[in-house]
Image (tube, rainbow, N blue to C red):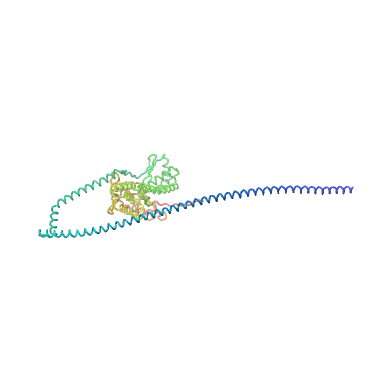
Amino acid sequence: MLNEILLGSSVATLSGLIGFFISKKISNANFDIYVDKAKAKASAIESEAQLLLQKSNLKAQEIELEALKQYESAKERAKADLFAREDDVIRKEQNFKRYKQNEEKNLHEERVALKAKKIDLERNEKSLNLLKKRYEEKLEDVLHAIEHSAGMTQAEAQKVLLEKVEEKSRSEIAHIVRRYENEAKNEAKKRANYILAQATSRFAGEFASERLTNTIHLENDELKGRIIGKEGRNIKTLETLLGVDIIIDDTPNAILVSSFNLYRRAIATKTLQLLIEDGRIQPARIEEIFEKVSDEFEASILSEGEEIVARLEIGVMHPELMKLIGRLRYRASYGQNALAHTLEVAHLAGIMAAEMGGDVALAKRAGLLHDIGKALTHEHEGNHVDLGAQICNRYNEHSVVINAIYAHHGYEDIHSIECGAVCAADALSAARPGARREVLESFLKRVTEIEEIASEHNGVKQAYAINAGREVRVIVNATLVNDDESILLAREIAKEIEEKVQYPGEIKVSVIRESRAVEFAR
């Protein structure tokens, strides 16, 4: 039994060894086949790479030949162009040499001719001097003969003759002088009337139409309550911030904005219109809209000034002057809009200067700037003449412009045609029927003076005259003025207004002191 088991194990072991060697042999045979295939593929790839390399070299050689060909072609063209330019330069040099030789020849001939003429002139001058000397000698002989026969010297005879001629001609001379003086006066008067007629007929301005109130239309009367706000908070903020008087009465679908200051009233009107369109009427929103509108107005007045200067064609002007020109739209003089008056004067002065042979552009420029100081009178001390001259001198304006600023109010004499045209145009613009209203101007002066008196006191931030000048609202700094001091301040302002301002009725002085506490939640 054991033998059979051993025999079976031996057979199994022998069979396994035989199978192992057989499988190893087969594996070695397959590996050789794979190696041969890989070598064949590598050989094919190498052959293909060699072929591609040869093609690339051929292509590179072709590109190089083409580039060399183009280079040679460009080189030949450049050489040909250079040779052509050299030939052209040589040809021009030759032409110039021939021209120079001809010019030198002509100059030489002219010099010879001039020299000959000079010799002839010198010879003729000597002959004339000799003849003149002989003539004077003969004249002396004749005069001596006449003096001897008449018994008078030459000077005595000349004096008697002149006296007789003057005596005989005196009346005729006086008549001629009077006649020409009258003709000159009549002609000057006709000419002046013609110039004024031409100027006034070619430019017609509007009548004064300044008002002290603006009307804002509402979609419904419910908006009035929103404008007033809870406990009057909104309308108080509006009047304090805008510096105007807002009148809300029984007029259906309308409120009034009242202020003598045109610029302030225009900003207030625009602010209210935007607030009504927006619908959110509250103190914070009011301040936001007011700042936005103020910035827009500042930009718009500069734009309007630039447009006016460009339209008049008067040259370059400093931006600050153009900004002041735009600001004139919100100033008035005797009820006449300052910008309308300024444009009218500029056009009239240009027309008159053209008729008199002056500089039209300079006359227009002087007319446009003659009242520029009125744009500064609300913020600076002094009259508009001195303020206008100072600002124009600061920005190097023409001397004619400075002369026109002073001369149109008689501060200086007129030194030029352009200045005379500006002064005449200023008088024409102011003298038109309905152009100005004295009552409105005196009212504006009174209201301005009231605001200035209130603003000059310590601790005052802002002062607004409202209710047609019958009330002045004074905003003070709460940190500098306490409640007791505000009462004294109101009394002092009222006393000073009584002493310095002439007015009918009474003026109410309201001193407003408020403090704000601001904090942010983050």
Quarter location, residue 160: bottom left
**Residue occupying image coordinates x 13% and y 56%:** 161
Query: In front: 455, or 151?
Result: 151
Query: In front: 344, or 191?
Result: 191
Q: Is residue 466 visible?
A: no
Quarter location, residue 153: bottom left
**Residue 291 rendering spot, x and y as whole percentages:** 43, 49
**Residue occupying image coordinates x 15% and y 50%:** 172
Q: Is residue 168 left or right of residue 291?
A: left
Q: Is residue 147 left or right of residue 404?
A: left
Q: Is residue 59 left or right of residue 221?
A: right
**Residue occupying image coordinates x 53% and y 51%:** 72
- Give the number of callouts: 0
**Residue 150 rendering spot, x and y as whole percentages:** 10, 58
Query: In front: 7, or 87?
Result: 87
**Residue 207 rendering spot, x and y as whole percentages:** 31, 43
Q: Is residue 87 visible?
A: yes
Q: Is residue 154 left or right of residue 10?
A: left
Query: In front: 49, or 337?
Result: 49
